[in-house]
Image (tube, grey):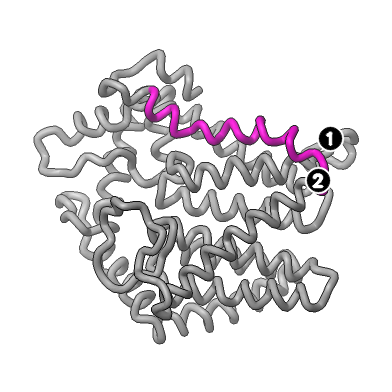
Amino acid sequence: LLIAGLLYGDRNPGDGLRYLGKYKELLLIALLIPCFQDERIRRRGLLAFALALVLTLLFSYAIGIGLLPEYFFMPSKTPGLTGSFNPVTFKLSITHNILMAIAAFMFAQMARYASVTGIRIFWGILSILAVYNVLFMVRGRTGYLILALLLVYFFYDIFKWKGLALAAMLGTLLFTGAYLGSDTFHSRITKAANEFSQWHPDQTAAVGDSVGLRMEWYKNSLEIIRDHPVFGVGTGGFPKAYAEKVKGADMLVPANPHNEYLLIATQIGLLGLTLLLYLFYRQWRLAKMLPSALERSLAHGLLIAIMSGCLFNSLLLDHTEGLLYGWMSGLLYAGLKLNSKKNDPST
């Protein structure tokens, strides 16, 4: 549909192929499945990814305690790196906290299924360190949300409905502790609450008002979808459609609405949004057929992270997050067996 979306609509020169190219990571799902058919290769792939997350986590702590300079290993041009101390490495804070929230969940699952006590302790400690990194060290509110949802799923996956009560208690302690004990967490949550309370649909959001701007972008994007409900404005047509929508108003024109569902719907309509949601639905159902408990849990965790993160960011458009989704999906679902219909939970 994204390719077909190039055939209609009006867009700025070059935007069609540029936006289409940003979704190239989705092709990895099909391309990588043949590469990870072997269970040993899948294990090595997961371990390699886990070790990359460990390295990111350790560098962040090294920056936090002053062993490395702030923004170590960051690109030379890093706009928006202002404000309080922010011990991120490799990526900006939103991406860093998304990765570390996933790391906390992944390490906890690896500890859960480890057969050796020492290895279980190793991954368990790293999971705790990742949780602390998200809540107490780095500012990135999407990571807060993803961590909370993965915490709920982790305990539900183990204890079913009884686990929800345990997750609620632990989550309350963690997030209350972060609110009271972390200036970074406290300021980010307070700022978000204040910006949301001050936002009004008839007023233009101020530059730097991240919540207000998002609400403004969501409102105008919904109006674009209302005007082009079925097929949208075409792939890459969002910037021009948005600029025309707010023409004459003193509003910022974003490259995307910071919501993947709205971005897909504006480009390729409600038909495209329906297919995206169906893709996520099928992945959730088929995750139950993956060969190992670890792979099943990680597949569900990946979907929780991506689906919730897409509410406040265009994650599939973003390079790192889109690559994460395509790569992890290709790796995990390479173990899917469809030989027996009786094992398919959707039948």
Q: Is residue 26 above or below residue 64?
A: above
Q: Position of residue 16 (x, y in %)?
A: 36, 23
Q: Amino acid at mark 1?
A: Leu
Which quadrant is the C terminus positioned in?
top right
**Residue hosting label 1:** 338
Q: Is residue 177 visible?
A: yes
Dot 1, how many residues are within 10 Å of its Cα: few (below 14), some (14-19), or many (20+)? few
Residues in magenta, as a range: 17-40
Q: Residue at image x 44%, y 80%? A: 178
> Residue, x 40% and y 39% (percent of image)?
262
User: Is residue 242 placed above or below 167 in the rendered structure?
Assistant: above
Which image quadrant for residue 234? top left
Neighbour class for label 2 at 10 Å: few (<14), some, many (≥20)? some
In x, y percent, where is residue 251? Answer: 16, 44
Query: What is the secondary structure assignment of the residue under circle 1?
Result: loop
Q: Which residue is mark 2?
A: 289
Does the image show residue 285?
no
Which residue is found at the position 42% from the left and 80% from the top? 65
The reply to whether discs 1 and 2 touch (Cβ–Cβ < 8 Å) is: yes
Residue at left offset 25%, top offset 69%: 83
Who is closer to the viewer here, 304 or 327?
327
- Residue 5 lies, in percent from the top left, at 43, 20
State the mark number for residue 306: none
What's the residue type where badge 2 is placed?
Met
